[in-house]
Structures are given as C-alpha cells and as structure tokens.
Image (cartoon, helix red, strand yellow):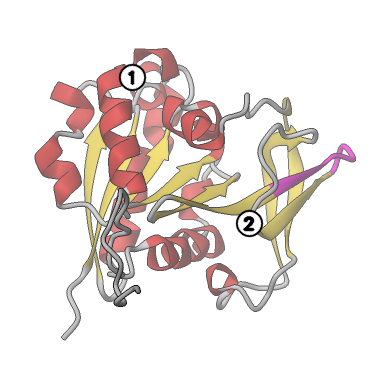
C-alpha cells in the first residue's frame, strides 16, 4: 500500500482570534476546517501549524515530514520570519509541494518563488464569483463541475502581477465585471506550486465541497513524485572519450 501524502496546513490564525463572527464560522480555524476535510480523504494525512507557534510550527523536523504545505495568510505576512521562509523555500526547491491559498499571494514564500510583486485589484462587497474550469483535463480539475459558483466572496481582479503560469486551470468571473487567473500551476526546482484564489475569511468557502475537492486534487498533484535529485558541478564523462 502506498504511503499517505503528508500535508501540513499552515494558517496565520489571526482573524479567527480577533473577530467573533469569523471564530463562529471557523471555530477550529480555517486550518482546522481544511485539515479535517483532508484527513477524511483516502491516502492523505494532514496536520496543522500556525504563525504563533515556535518557529511558526514549521521546524526542520516538521518540514522533513511534509510532502505538501498549504499556506493561508493575510494580515501578518510581515511577521513571518525570514529564516523560516528560507527553510520552506529550500524544501520546495527540493521537492515539497506548496499550495498558496487566497491572500497568500502576498506571502513572503509565494512572492519569493514568483519573483514578482504578486499585486492585484481587490474589492470586498460580497459579490458573486464563478470559478470556471478552463483546463478540464488537468488533474487538479478532476471531478470538478464546469464552474464553481460562490454566492458571496471578495473580488480579486487583473492585472495579477505573477509570472505566466506553467498551466492555468481556473479563471474567475465576478459580478462586478472583473476576471482573474484563479488556479495557477508552477514548477520551481523539484517542487510544484499551485495558487488557488478562493478563501476569504468572512465567508464559508472552506466548507464548499467543490472548493475542497480542488484543494484535495492540488495536494495530490503537488506531492513529490520521487524522481532523482539533479546533480550539478563538474562530473567526469560517462562515456570513454578519445
């Protein structure tokens, strides 16, 4: 039997502590809701980590036991220690998957991996979003309907200052007229990175089973595939020369 994909669900966990209505919506935090779902899926084992834990819960030991890291942050990006970001970056380059959720587009780890500002337009008035599948053959879209409709959400709009995605799986349309690249795949070193837009904290988005299916599919897609690590330097020739 294949080993379970080991997931660490990271959340800055500030909104749920600061606002009663968000605490009522996510009594175990957004990380708790996501991890509970992932732990119900075959072949996946999830743990959680949060900003205020020592080393943000992302010690060398935790990361060594993590195949895929999901990341949610918003108001406390600047509080994430640079040495922890560097540690996560090394693991991604070495093969660990990373899934950046919603406002994690501004996280230190995502902007470092992208090499751009990752800036965008935004508006929070609770408008409708249709998240269209534009690559139905992609494994992250497996089992997802033609579109996911979210009745109330925060708008993110183009221009989204990211590199051209290696693969674009989802594009969002909002009732106010904007569109947005909402499901973007990248390869960085030996690791796979997926940005997925939905997830504003004041709405029950991480209870939507289609959204959670995408997160699950992304975990399976981003998990390390076990290929040999590349070798660099000045090797001797493989074949006899001369």
Element at label 1: loop
176 part of magenta stretch: yes
The residue wearing badge 1 is 80
Q: Quadrant of residue 139?
A: bottom right
Q: In which quadrant is the C terminus drawn?
A: bottom left
Q: Nearer the viewer, residue 240 or 78?
A: 240
**56 relative position to 224: left or right:** left
Circle on res. 166: 2
Q: Is residue 109 visible?
A: yes
Residue at 31% from the left image edge and 70% from the top image edge: 227
- Outermost residue on the bottom side: it is 1
Q: In which quadrant is the N terminus drawn?
A: bottom left
Rendered position, 152 above or below 231: above
x%, y% of residue 172? 75, 50
Element at label 2: loop
Circle on res. 48: none
Q: Is residue 200 visible?
A: no
- Category of crowding for the residue at label 1, using alpha-carbon neighbours closer than 10 angstroms: few (below 14), some (14–19), many (at least 20): some
Question: What span is colored magenta in the figure?
Answer: 175-181
What's the distance in space between the residues labelled 2 and 1, CA to CA?
A: 27 Å
């Amino acid at each position: 039997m294949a080993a379970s994909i080991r997931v660490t669900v990271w959340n800055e966990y500030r909104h749920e502590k600061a606002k009663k209505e968000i605490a009522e919506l996510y009594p175990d935090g957004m990380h708790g809701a996501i991890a509970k779902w992932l732990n119900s899926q075959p072949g996946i084992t999830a743990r959680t980590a949060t900003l205020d834990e020592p080393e943000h819960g992302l010690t060398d030991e935790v990361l060594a036991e993590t195949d895929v890291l999901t990341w949610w942050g918003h108001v406390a990006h600047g509080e994430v220690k640079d040495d922890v970001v560097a540690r996560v970056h090394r693991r991604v380059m070495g093969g660990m998957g990373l899934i950046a959720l919603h406002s994690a587009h501004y996280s230190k780890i995502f902007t470092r991996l992208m090499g751009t500002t990752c800036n965008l337009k935004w508006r929070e008035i609770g408008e409708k979003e249709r998240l269209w599948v534009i690559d139905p053959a992609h494994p992250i879209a497996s089992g997802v309907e033609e579109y996911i409709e979210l009745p109330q959400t925060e708008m993110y709009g183009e221009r989204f200052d990211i590199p051209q995605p290696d693969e674009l799986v989802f594009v969002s349309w909002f009732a106010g007229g904007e569109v947005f690249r909402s499901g973007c795949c990248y390869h960085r070193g030996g690791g796979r990175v997926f940005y997925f837009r939905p997830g504003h904290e004041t709405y029950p988005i991480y209870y939507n089973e289609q959204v959670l299916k995408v997160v699950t599919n992304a975990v399976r897609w981003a998990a390390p595939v076990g290929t040999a690590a590349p070798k660099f330097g000045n090797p001797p020739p493989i074949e006899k020369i001369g």
